Image: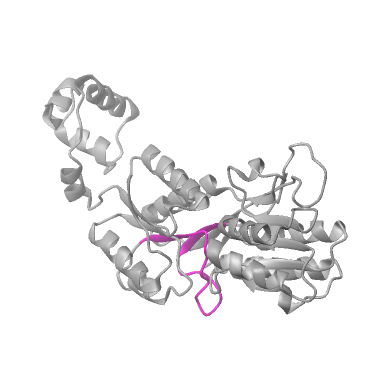
Amino acid sequence: MPTMADVARCAGVSVATVSHVLNDTRPVLPHTRQAVLDAIDELGYTPNTLARSLVTSRTRSIGLAVSAISNPYFTEILQGVEADAVERGYSLLIADPHDDPEHERKVVQLLHERRVDGMIVAPSAAPRDLLAYLTRHDVPAVFLDRVIDDRADGSPRFDQVCAENAEPMARLVAHLAELGHRRIGLVAGLPGLSTTGERISGYRHGLAAAGLPHDERLLVHGDSGEAGAERATAALLALAAPPTALVTGNNAMTIGALRALRERGMSVPDDIALCCFDDFAWADLFAPRLTAIAQPSRDIGARAVQVLLDRLAAPDRPTRTVRLPCAFVHRTSCGCPEQPARPHTFQSPEEGTTP
């Protein structure tokens, strides 16, 4: 097996120069760097990752703590994280916190003990222990999908990457109102999550913009899962004046809502219109096809890696929150006829920087 010394001889440089090229520990002239890379390729040299980590105090690994990895939305985020990490020469260690605050802190500690260079975390609804651990141990971290503005001035303690939530949700409500609906229900996610709060805010804003009253009975929590959404939808349908249109807060809750409608023999959109936050691969296969907000999930994952690596390169830079735009995918479950496949993208400031 070729060694670093073999690479140095082949490239006509010192072993120290080869080390600098491999570890980025000192600038190397472009033609010298290329000679080293050519020698590595010619000899089939494989760097010793453990030895490199001892030299650089870096393992070139990233910890990812994301709940519900089976959820298609988080699966696509994971794919975005993994693809960008590998492209940049990093490996990925993955753990599922199960949206449980105590388990969340445990898995983050385990990832930290594996000496990952930094972490990407989708925090739970009660992340106090998570924040305390990351802060106490000064762990470079990026929050994913769910944001936490926890300083006294409302700014984030950690970098964050997420999608826009409020405006796309308001657009769904406005669209249903434009179709003549006056009682629009919302099956919201788990209380305490920023995504839940922001989508509720968008729902209320959409109602107000359409001149519709906000009836608290039409807002129920499906707790971000299928079973909870099925129960919540059943409660809405049992009202004396049930909604004529329904918006679900994520893809899992859309499935639960559809089950509740099927149990009651209700047809979409003939008996009730349906729109959902989160598009997914088979939304286009339902009959009717689901009108949805599509989040840029892979881009969210890739951007989280980029933001984390920026943090590793400049630990003292100001924290920032990066928000990516969503797309309105107009299909037929809202009660509209078939539309050309031209999704509308919500434009937004890509990122906000906080001190």
Residue drawn at (33%, 72%) of the image: 133
Position in image of residue 209 (x %, y %):
83, 67
Residue 42, magenta (yes or no): no
Q: In the drawing, does residue 90 fall left or right of residue 256?
A: left
Say above or below: 137 vs 122.
Answer: below
Question: In which quadrant is the N terminus drawn?
Answer: top left
Q: Is residue 170 above or below residue 327?
A: below
Residue shown at the point (68%, 63%) measured from the top left:
166
Left or right, 336 with reference to 346: right
Q: Specify the quadrant of the image occupied by residue 316.
A: bottom left
Pick the residue in front: 244 or 340: 244
Residue name at image x 18 percent, y 22 percent: 12
Does residue 316 appear in the picture of this structure? Answer: yes
- Rendered position, 58 above or below 112: above
Q: Which residues are magenta?
A: 140-162
Quarter location, residue 247: bottom right
Q: How is the image coloured?
A: one colour
Point 52% across, 45% down: residue: 298
Q: Position of residue 146 (x, y in %)?
A: 52, 63
The percent coordinates of residue 75 (x first, y second) are: 46, 48
Residue 19 screen position, x and y as percent: 20, 37
**Residue situated in front as seen by the camera: 17 or 324:** 324
Q: Nearer the viewer, residue 347 or 40?
A: 347
Q: Is residue 225 visible?
A: no
The answer to which image quadrant residue 186 occupies is bottom right
Q: Main secondary structure of the magenta part?
A: loop
How many marks do you count on the picture?
0
Task: Inspect the magenta stretch and tell me whether residue 153 lies in it.
Answer: yes
